Amino acid sequence: MSILILIATILLPPLGVAAKHGLGGTTLLNLVLTLLGFIPGLIHGLYVNYAR
C-alpha cells in the first residue's frame, strides 16, 4: 500500500495526501499549493507523507 501512496503523491499530490491523512486541512493546504505550482504541492506532499 505504501508504494501506491508514493506513486499517487508523485503524480497528483493532493490524492496521495488524502489517501494517507483523509480529507482535512492538510489535504486542503496541499491542494492550494498544487494549484499555485506543482513543485510546492509535491514537496509538501512528500514531506507530510514521509518526513513526519
Image: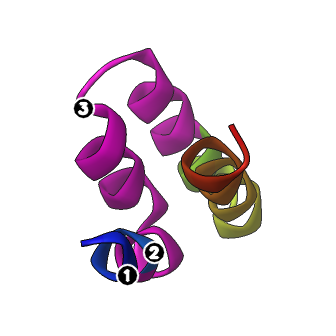
Looking at the picture, tell me which residue is in the foreground, 22 or 2: 2
The quarter of the picture where the N terminus appears is bottom left
Q: Residue at x 69, y 48 (%)?
A: 44
Q: Tell me which amino acid carries mark 1.
A: Ile
Q: Are marks 1 and 2 in contact (CB under 8 Å)?
A: yes
Q: CA distance from mark 1 to mark 3?
A: 17 Å
Is residue 29 shown above or below 6?
Answer: above
The kind of secondary structure the magenta stretch mainly shows is: helix
Q: CA distance from mark 2 to mark 3?
A: 15 Å
Image coordinates for residue 35, horizontal then vertical, percent? 55, 51
The quarter of the picture where the C terminus appears is top right
Which residues make up the magenta segment? 7-32
Q: Secondary structure at mark 1?
A: helix
Mark 1, residues whose alpha carbon is within 10 Å: few (<14), some, or many (≥20)?
few
Image coordinates for residue 51, horizontal then vertical, percent? 73, 48
Is residue 17 shown above or below 11?
Answer: above
Q: Which residue is mark 3?
A: 22
Is residue 32 shown above or below 40?
Answer: above
Q: Residue at x 24, y 32 (%)?
A: 22
Q: Return the mark for residue 3.
A: 1
**Which residue is outermost to the top?**
25
Q: Residue at x 69, y 60 (%)?
A: 37
Left or right: 41, with 14 as reference point: right
Q: CA distance from mark 1 to mark 2?
A: 5 Å
Mark 3, residues whose alpha carbon is within 10 Å: few (<14), some, or many (≥20)?
few
Left or right: 38, with 32 as reference point: right
Q: Residue at x 24, y 27 (%)?
A: 23
Q: Which residue is mark 2?
A: 6
Image coordinates for residue 7, horizontal then vertical, percent? 40, 83
Q: Are marks 2 and 3 in contact (CB under 8 Å)?
A: no
Colour basis: rainbow
Q: Are marks 1 and 3 in contact (CB under 8 Å)?
A: no
